[in-house]
Image (cartoon, rainbow, N blue to C red):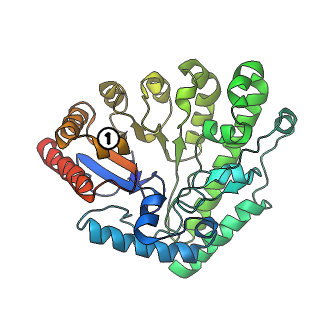
Amino acid sequence: MKQLISYIATGAPATRRPAHGILPFLRPEIGFTPKWYRAALGIDFGERWHTNPEYRRQTRIEMRSEIMKRFPGTSIGQNDQDETDLLTGTYGACAIAAIYGIPVRYDQENWPTSEHQYLTEEDIENLTPPDLDQNPFFQSLMKQVDWIGEHEGRITGFMNWQGVLNNAQRLRGQELFMDLFLAPERTRHLMECVSTTMIDAAKKLHQKQKKYDETLSFFTISNCLVNMVDPGLYEAFLLPLDQKIAGAFDVIGIHNCAWSATPYLDQYAGIHRVAYLDMGIDSDLEKARKLFPDTRRSIMYTPMDVANKSNDEIKNDLEKIAREYGPCDIVAADIEYGTPDDKIMEFIEICDILSKKHQ
């Protein structure tokens, strides 16, 4: 089975990409917040960054140059398929909500968020998946994609289509969690619409990319909010839709942020062709490895731990991960401005030492 690995483009949140070649036993993937890059380079990550691929290209070159200067010899921000990825990070995690008409709120030094303009009960009852060929937001994104193809000769990168629960919450707000109990059929309808749009949007993007010899057919399900529902609710409402998404693509990845994935591992094991799975260090790592032996596993190591733990504490954490969970990625995402560069280099060095030990 093909595997996916973690990938953090410069200025972008964490996502996934296809694995290539021989992977280290512990493979570090490092990422920084927009505020980190703004402090270093003065980049404006507001609306222009997300709507103008030419400006993104300029800033990506600046960011990559800064990374190479400060962290020489590392793979931070690199996609080994192409030097210039002009797609990943566009609109952050807001694209599906924006397709459904929720405005995007931009920020000069942060990723965008969805405005708190939620669908009413009546809105949801009358909801249908938008026609993407006529949808203004989606078509504006496709114009950017066409520009990238015309100017770069390839459309390298990945949109973050999120997960069903994440997107449904952006559309309904906190009322969603009451709806699970008080209006289950209406909630299922909302989630069914959302999942259909996620699949359709990803497939239309893949078709654009295939014109330039890209052969992508994977999806990453972002279950960032899964700990807000118990395993029973996940199995009743979300597992069928995660299985639906998995059935529409060659392989999928499942992202859980740094939370414990333990309550959901048995359900995840019922999803076909899971090529990537991440979780927090407090998860049952040995169980995850047993259930997903052919999956590229990953640990989301928090930026607070990178910044605040001693090297000995970090080494102990990574040794535990290597012993119980490896081989895997170690994702240190969202590192904030103020974390010393030496801490980053030492973190990578510890991963390298342990990789050689366990390889």
Res. 41 image quadrant: bottom left
Q: Tell me the crowding category of disc 1: few under 14, some 14 to 19, or many 20 or more residues within 10 angstroms, Cα based.
A: some
Quadrant into which the N terminus falls: top left
The image shows residue 157, relative to residue 26, as above or below, that is below
Q: Position of residue 213 (x, y in %)?
A: 50, 69
Instruction: Identify the residue under disc 1.
Output: 305
Q: Nearer the viewer, residue 11 or 154?
A: 11
Q: Position of residue 150 (x, y in %)?
A: 58, 80
Res. 135 image quadrant: bottom right
Residue 301 visible here: no
Q: Position of residue 15 (x, y in %)?
A: 47, 52
Q: Is residue 12 left or right of residue 174?
A: left
Q: Nearer the viewer, residue 201 or 349?
A: 349
Quadrant into which the C terminus falls: top left
The residue that appears at 35% across and 48% down in the rendered structure is: 332
Residue 317 visible here: yes
Res. 309 image quadrant: top left
Q: Nearer the viewer, residue 304 or 262?
A: 304
Numbered disc total: 1
Q: Is residue 100 left or right of residue 290?
A: right
